Image (tube, grey):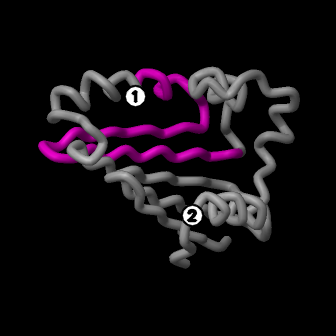
Amino acid sequence: MTETILTRAADGAFTTVTYVADGDSVTTQMTKNVLHYEPRGIADRDAAEAQYGDLAEKFAAIDGVEHSIEFGETQLVEIVTLTYSELDVAALALATGAGPVDDPDEARQVSLKEAVAALKRDNYSQAR
């Protein structure tokens, strides 16, 4: 198993994506988002909770998804972990608004090389 970490900072948000892979096959993806309120136009903790508070409910019942969100005074920290072998792809697509999935088994097959390339095109930097 190998671990690959990519990061990006933009508009008051710092994102770290960690892939765990067996060869080129991603088995687990962990995304940590640290979102600072002020640069995003969020007044305070209460406003952040009102805007993002329902995220935990969206992901709670989806197999293969672990989600947590903590609201601080000046920022929130969200962590989403996907375990692809257990992932209910259709439920995740519905929760995120991604639309229907034609082949859930195929959607669980994530190429590390392709995933890293896609994030780099989106201005992520590879940390490890």
Label annotation for residue 56: 1
The residue labelled by disc 2 is: 123
- Residue 40 occupies which quadrant of the picture? top left
Residue located at (55% from left, 65% from top)? 124
- Residue 123 occupies which quadrant of the picture? bottom right
Mark 2 or mark 1: name the one nearer the start of the chain. 1
Residue located at (61% from left, 58% from top)? 122
Name the spot of residue 2 as percent of width and height, x first: 65, 73
Quadrant of the frame with the N terminus: bottom right
Residue located at (21% from left, 45% from top)? 38
Few, some or many residues within 10 Å of mark 2 (<14, 14–19, 20+): few
CB-based contact (under 8 Å), mark 2 and mark 1: no
Towards the viewer: 63 or 17 = 17
Magenta span contains residue 103: no
Few, some or many residues within 10 Å of mark 1 (<14, 14–19, 20+): some
Residue located at (54% from left, 71% from top)? 125
Amino acid type at mark 2: Asn
Please, what secondary structure does the residue beneath circle 1 have? Answer: helix
- Residue 19 occupies which quadrant of the picture? bottom right
Towards the viewer: 61 or 8 = 8
Q: Is residue 63 above or below residue 115?
A: above
Front label number (2 vs 1): 2
Q: Is residue 80 above or below residue 24?
A: above
Towards the viewer: 108 or 63 = 108
Amino acid type at mark 1: Ala
**Left or right: where does residue 15 sit relative to residue 98?**
left
Distance Cα–Cα, label 2 vs label 1: 27 Å
Name the spot of residue 110 as percent of width and height, x first: 76, 52
Please, what secondary structure does the residue beneath circle 2 have? Answer: loop
Q: Is residue 108 above or below residue 55?
A: below
> Which stretch did the figure color magenta?
56-84
